[in-house]
Image (cartoon, grey):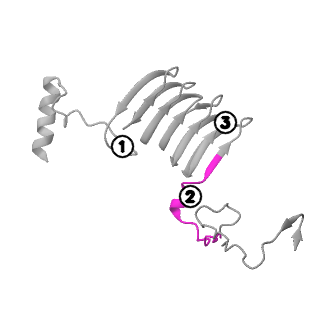
């Protein structure tokens, strides 16, 4: 029999096996996709959520909670977050920030306490106090203020009292008072 001008050899047909598709090399349409079960929201999932404060917003107040936050507009107040905070290029924050990690591309006037790290990117302008165990300041960033670094970060760090710190020189009268207090204890 001829199909489109080709003749089939009589008697023997070539023994050709069709190739089995390899599951790993198969296109995405051919791979069997098993849907993942939807589980209940865990507290650790909340820190993965990201909230945006829009470019045209001007907000005054305090923000606290868990999750990531990206600021695109103007904010005057305080942040207390369990998560990452990013100040985008063109954004302005006047106030104090406490978060796990902070990334600055815009302008911040105030103090920042980060448990993990602070990043001042090339377009950042920071005026104030930074407290963090790790910091990265890129070329072009502007930083005018103080920097305190330590291995562990407590959310509320209090300076050591002068009497408990032997490196601080005290006037004679203060030394006598410090000795009297330590003898009473």
Q: Is residue 75 above or below residue 32?
A: above
Left or right of residue 121: residue 3: right
Report helix, strand or loop for mark 2: helix
The residue positioned farthest toward the front in the image shown: 10
Residue closest to the eye, 179 or 28:
28
Residue at mark 1 to residue at mark 3: CA–CA distance: 27 Å
Q: Main SS of the magenta segment?
A: loop
At 31% from the left and 40% from the top, the residue drawn is 151
Residue that mark 1 sits on: 153
Label number found at residue 72: 3
Q: Is residue 175 above or below residue 37?
A: above
Q: Quadrant of the N terminus?
A: bottom right
**Magenta stretch: includes residue 168:** no
At 60% from the left and 66% from the top, the residue drawn is 22
Report helix, strand or loop for mark 3: loop
Q: Position of residue 47 (x, y in %)?
A: 54, 54
Q: Quadrant of residue 181?
A: top left
Q: Which residues are magenta?
A: 32-51
Q: Is residue 127 above or below residue 26?
A: above
């Amino acid at each position: 029999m001829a199909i489109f001008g080709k003749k089939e050899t009589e008697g023997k047909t070539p023994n050709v096996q069709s190739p089995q598709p390899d599951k790993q090399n198969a296109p995405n349409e051919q791979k069997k996709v098993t849907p993942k079960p939807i589980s209940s929201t865990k507290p650790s999932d909340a820190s993965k959520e990201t909230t945006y404060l829009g470019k045209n917003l001007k907000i005054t107040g305090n923000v606290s909670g868990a999750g990531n936050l990206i600021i695109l507009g103007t904010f005057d107040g305080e942040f207390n977050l369990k998560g990452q905070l990013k100040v985008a290029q063109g954004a302005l924050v006047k106030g104090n920030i406490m978060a796990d990690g902070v990334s600055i591309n815009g302008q911040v006037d105030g103090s920042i306490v980060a448990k993990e790290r602070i990043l001042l990117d090339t377009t950042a302008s920071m005026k104030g106090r930074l407290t963090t165990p790790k910091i990265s300041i890129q070329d072009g960033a502007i930083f005018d203020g103080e920097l305190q670094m330590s291995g562990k970060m407590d959310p509320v760090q209090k300076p050591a009292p002068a009497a408990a710190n032997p490196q601080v020189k005290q006037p004679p009268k203060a030394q006598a008072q410090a000795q009297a207090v330590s003898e009473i204890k």
